[in-house]
Image (cartoon, rainbow, N blue to C red):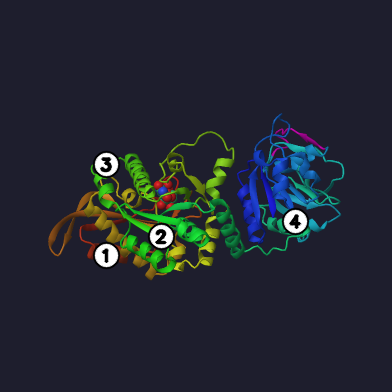
Amino acid sequence: RLLIIDFGSQVTQLIARRLRELNVYCEIHPYQNVTDAFLAEFGPKAVIFSGGPDSVMRDGSPRPPKTVYDLGVPILGICYGQQVMMHDLGGKVEAGEHATAEFGRAYVTPSEDRPEFLNGWFLEGKEQVWMSHGDHVAEIAPGFDVYGTSPGAPFAITADLSRNFFAVQFHPEVHHTPNGATLYENFIKLAGFSGDWTMGAYREEMIEKIREQVGDKKVICALSGGVDSSVTGILLHEAIGDQLTCVFVDHGLLRKNEAEQVVQMFRENYNLNLIHADESDLFLGELEGVSDPEVKRKTIGRLFIDVFQKYANQIEGAEFLAQGTLYPDVIESVSFSGGPSVTIKSHHNVGGLPEKMGLKLVEPLRELFKDEVRALGHELGLPASFIGRHPFPGPGLAIRCPGEISRDKLRILREADAVYIDQIRKHGLYDEIWQAFAAILPMRTVGVMGDGRTYDYALALRAVTSVDGMTADYYPFTHEFLGETATRIINEVKGVNRVFYDCTSKPPGTIELE
Ligand code: XMP
């Protein structure tokens, strides 16, 4: 396996991505954790130094242990990683001045020699790369040669071929270095990886790891019906069988038939211990009269934890809590991207619960990206319809009902959502859309139906495209589709007489209405 030492770059996880795409197993570890003992235990077959925001000239700036250079394995340093290598191995790094700092697109041209590391590069003379550096290498370390230069980086590509050490000033992992994946491919070939790591192998490895971690103890897992928690539950079930109990909390804010579908899917296909906790009266009761979005979210979060704890207490001897934490959730806590960010919305999760209950965490998806979790779900036999489902927020329909919630509004939301999603599926658009839903607006409007006056609710339909939910654009339905859908909803859902379509992107909007 390959070790990526993270020096805090915003794009470290993309390095892992590129390697996974090449079927190489890698792990990212923050530099603070990479000690001599760690290296000995990990036994990497190759090492990559990520970029990072610091300056190697600053005392106390991030460094790998010196022994990494004596492991006899190939090393690739990227940006800050290059500067670390040069500095550690006897070269010289200088502080950036405006004239030498480079940000954004640049073009690298080759030197006469083309080592194997550059196979497939410079076929058309120069290569576009993405630079983002203030400091720069002023003198390369002994043993290194230059194999590519850019106007702002005379040492854009350097290598010590006798030791298979490579160091580049740019970021080959980002989209704006179009041929960057080729460098990773060459690097892993030089390191002797055969590229045969698969999801099947990951499944086996994880099962072993879970067994090792848990032993004969009991584990509880909160199932939401979403992909992440479902895959977590199934993987654990495969690893430890009856030592696992899953709790599915129905807070009364789910979509039409959702609770039944989720419970049935798990009972029929997986035969795992599953508690179906119908607590809708409790949640809806406590939410009565609550209209502030943050109070709503916090109330639901608090009740969720109380309820989960109540059921978990019934499972004697539970020592672990399983969570579907994904890699992108982990990396945020590693990177040192700066000060505390503003809370836009208090996201619903079971954070804080492990400490409160004295539970240890099992997080088998910590190293995976969302699409890899889907692939693992597929591997575990989770139905395709489940794997491809749009995301659904923890607080459920509550945040699609701005203002006060009522059972009647929830009924309208469920029915309208079902018609809307049916329309989207019928038109073959479901998989093109990241997320689509109906929201009920806190107002009534006047209409006319069958010669009579109506005074009913208005709905907003929302559909967005996105990669990660962080930014999003509205989906450009045809007018025909929108017209047909509005007509169906008004005809089929009692209590609605008007439908709007939300054309707001994120930012400035958010995906959910609250
Ligand atoms: P926003 O509304 O913040 O949503 O643009 C981004 C994505 O996150 C989902 N979302 C949540 N997911 N707990 C969740 O698990 C939450 O509290 C929560 N709030 C929003 C939302 O559905 C969208 O996919």
Mark 2: few, some, or many residues within 10 Å (few <14, many ≥20)?
Answer: some
Point out the frontmost of discs 4 and 2. 2
Residue 85 placement (x, y as % from top left) = 77, 41
Residue visible at 28% across and 55% down?
459
Q: Label 1 amino acid?
A: Thr
At numbered mark 3, what does the secondary structure look like: helix, strand or loop? loop
Dot 4 or dot 1: first in sequence order is 4
Number of marks in picture: 4
Q: Label 3 amino acid?
A: Val
Point out the frontmost of discs 1 and 2. 2
Tag 2 residue: 273
Q: CA distance from mark 1 to mark 2?
A: 44 Å
Residue visible at 41% across and 56% down?
246
Q: CA distance from mark 4 to mark 3?
A: 57 Å
Tag 1 residue: 487
Mark 4: few, some, or many residues within 10 Å (few <14, many ≥20)?
Answer: many
User: Which label sits on residue 460?
Assistant: none
Determine whether the beta carbon of the residue marked 4 sits less than 8 angstroms from the nearest atom of ligand 1: no
In the image, residue 97 lies in the stretch drawn in magenta: yes
Is residue 164 toward the left or the right of residue 14 in the image?
right
Tag 4 residue: 187
Q: Label 4 amino acid?
A: Phe
Residue visible at 26% across and 54% down?
410
Residue 55 placement (x, y as % from top left) = 70, 34
Front residue of this view, candidates 246 and 345: 246
Residue numbers of the magenta segment: 91-101
Is residue 289 toward the left or the right of residue 241 in the image?
left
